[in-house]
Image (cartoon, coloured by chain):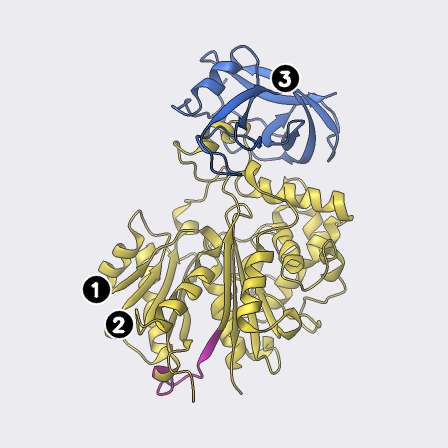
Chain colours: A yellow, B blue
């Protein structure tokens, strides 16, 4: 007996990427149309909507723009982890019968709109406005910089090792025609170290891109997906947690909430890190990946600096990771999470051309949001 | 000179900011469980109790981590300057600037100093021992 209501991903697609001049809602609608087309479904099938980052009323705003009347809405705003959370939340809603077809959509025009600010967005009534913003941290960069500094202090991690993450991401992007840096050529460790320091020890090339982009995922039941064109991608496990909003409130700079999120996802899937064929780990900064690799159990605590060297995470290495080129070289429109999922789906379907990981059957996506604030892991699988 | 971006004190933080005028750095302590926390709140983050009192911090602290900021997020700041997470002797970690300390490193001891704000409040900063 098959599990008829098992949640699956039936469609995944980007809309426009790069410098588009388009609005957030246009980017969302383009991606939605593309993902529904990929799934073989239409807007009329959608009864669950999962979106954020549009406006104060993101869920209703997107529903109105698309002309849908969803009966299940989730607009959780947890920064970069939101979209891995949405997959987990949509999976529960589908399994329990609260919705049949879930649309998970995102769009951001921050490069065209020049809406990104070095100091981040400050809510005047939040405690940070009294206790942290007076000191002039760059947000989020300075918190990740302090995590890198502490990791270097505790474990001897080097700037050269962090740079390897950016070098590998670029090498993958050269194999992804949609990547923002596809035609920009390779970079070396020396290139990263020679790029300007922004917040020590992070250089400009340790930081993700700033781009526009839209992306969407369509989820439904295994039963419904049997009649759809693409092989269904099963949601095997999900976990999430939140640890802090303020910089001073983080429990530990080098042991993040990714451990809890990952453990819960592995337990639900009945899998462990050794079972993952391809990993999509949120690379807002090079240090983010180092912290995720350790917290998710791909290596021991303090070992990720060494782990990423010698081309292990680059094309041809034995740990295929961020195969799209990641936030560092493919796209980064404020929240990268949905693009981790889109690439994982494509890898599991075998659609990735020259960057395809052979026989990829299990993928792990991990979103990290805010200033190491929010953490969500999704484990996906495909039957072959 | 452009002033630092800093929000006004509110109902929950007024007493804390008032103490800075006398160069006293207050740290909340839960009467029920003894846990210390910063920033000020009306609930204990360890046990959920709501009776909290203030103790005066010694001003001794160590650097948990630090970063030199190379680009200004606001006209008040002139890079490069040091932003740090500093662990108070009492336990809580605070964000601050480290001034006049030369080379900053993790785990180095620092001590509290004060900067005048235009409205009479003072802002806690840290410097080398």
* Residue A20 placement, left or right of B79: left
> Picture coordinates of residue B32 (x, y %)?
52, 31
In this view, the residue in front, A184 or B1, is B1
Same chain letter for marks 3 and 2 = no
Residue identifier under label 2: A43
Do the residues bearing badges 2 and 1 touch, measured as CB atoms within 8 Å?
A: yes
A161 is higher (above) or lower (below) than B84: below
The N terminus of chain A appears in which quarter of the rendering? Answer: bottom left
Helix, strand or loop status at disc 1 = loop
Residue span colored magenta: A224-235
Q: Is residue A377 magenta-colored? A: no
Q: Which residue is labeled 1 in the image? A: A67
Mark 3 sits on what residue? B113
Label 2: element kind: helix
Separation (CA) of disc 2 from disc 1: 8 Å
Q: Secondary structure at mark 3?
A: strand
Specify the quadrant of the image occupied by residue A319. Answer: bottom right
Co-location on one chain, circles 1 and 3:
no
Q: Position of residue A94 (x, y in %)?
A: 35, 72
């Amino acid at each position: 007996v098959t599990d008829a209501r098992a949640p699956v991903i039936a469609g995944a697609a980007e809309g426009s990427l790069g410098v588009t001049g388009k609005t957030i809602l246009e980017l969302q609608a383009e991606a939605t149309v593309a993902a529904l087309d990929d799934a073989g479904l239409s807007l009329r099938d959608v009864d669950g909507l999962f979106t954020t980052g549009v406006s104060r009323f993101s869920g209703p705003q997107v529903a109105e723009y698309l002309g849908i009347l969803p009966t299940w809405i989730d607009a959780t705003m947890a920064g970069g982890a939101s979209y891995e959370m949405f997959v987990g939340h949509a999976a529960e809603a589908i399994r329990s019968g609260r919705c049949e077809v879930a649309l998970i959509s995102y769009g951001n025009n921050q490069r065209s709109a020049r809406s990104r600010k070095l100091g981040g967005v400050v809510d005047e009534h939040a405690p940070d406005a009294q206790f942290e913003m007076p000191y002039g941290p760059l947000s989020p960069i300075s918190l990740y910089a302090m995590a890198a500094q502490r990791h270097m202090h505790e474990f001897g991690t080097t700037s050269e090792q962090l740079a390897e993450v950016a070098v590998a991401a670029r090498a993958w992007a050269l194999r992804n025609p949609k990547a923002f840096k596809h035609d920009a050529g390779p970079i070396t460790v020396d290139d990263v170290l020679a790029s300007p320091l922004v917040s020590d020890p992070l250089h400009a090339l340790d930081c993700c891109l700033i781009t526009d982009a839209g992306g969407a995922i369509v989820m439904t039941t295994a039963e419904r997906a049997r009649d759809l064109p693409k092989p269904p991608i099963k949601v095997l496990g999900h976990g999430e947690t939140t640890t802090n909003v303020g910089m001073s409130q983080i429990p530990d700079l080098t042991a993040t909430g990714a451990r809890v999120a990952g453990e819960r996802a592995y337990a639900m899937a009945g899998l462990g890190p050794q079972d993952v064929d391809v990993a999509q780990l949120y690379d807002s900064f090079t240090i983010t990946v180092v912290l995720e690799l350790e917290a998710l159990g791909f290596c021991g605590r303090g070992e990720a600096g060494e782990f990423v060297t010698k081309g292990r995470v680059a094309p041809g290495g034995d740990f295929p990771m961020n195969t799209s080129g990641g936030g560092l070289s493919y796209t980064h429109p404020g929240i990268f999470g949905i693009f981790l999922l889109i690439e994982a789906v494509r890898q599991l379907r075998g659609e990735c051309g020259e960057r395809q990981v052979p026989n990829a059957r299990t993928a792990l996506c991990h979103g990290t949001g805010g200033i190491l604030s929010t953490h969500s892991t999704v484990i996906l699988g495909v039957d072959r | 000179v452009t002033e630092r971006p800093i929000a006004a004190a509110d109902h929950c933080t007024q007493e804390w900011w008032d103490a800075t005028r006398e160069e006293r750095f207050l740290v909340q302590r839960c009467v029920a469980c003894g846990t210390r926390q910063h920033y000020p709140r009306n609930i204990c983050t360890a046990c959920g109790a709501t009776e909290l009192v203030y103790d005066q911090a010694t001003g001794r602290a160590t650097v948990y981590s630090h970063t030199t900021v190379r680009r200004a997020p606001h006209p008040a700041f002139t890079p490069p300057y040091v932003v740090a997470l500093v662990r108070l002797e009492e336990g809580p970690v605070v964000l601050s600037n480290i001034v006049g300390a030369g080379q900053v490193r993790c785990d180095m001891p620092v001590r509290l100093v004060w900067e005048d704000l235009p409205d009479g409040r003072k802002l806690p900063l840290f410097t080398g021992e």
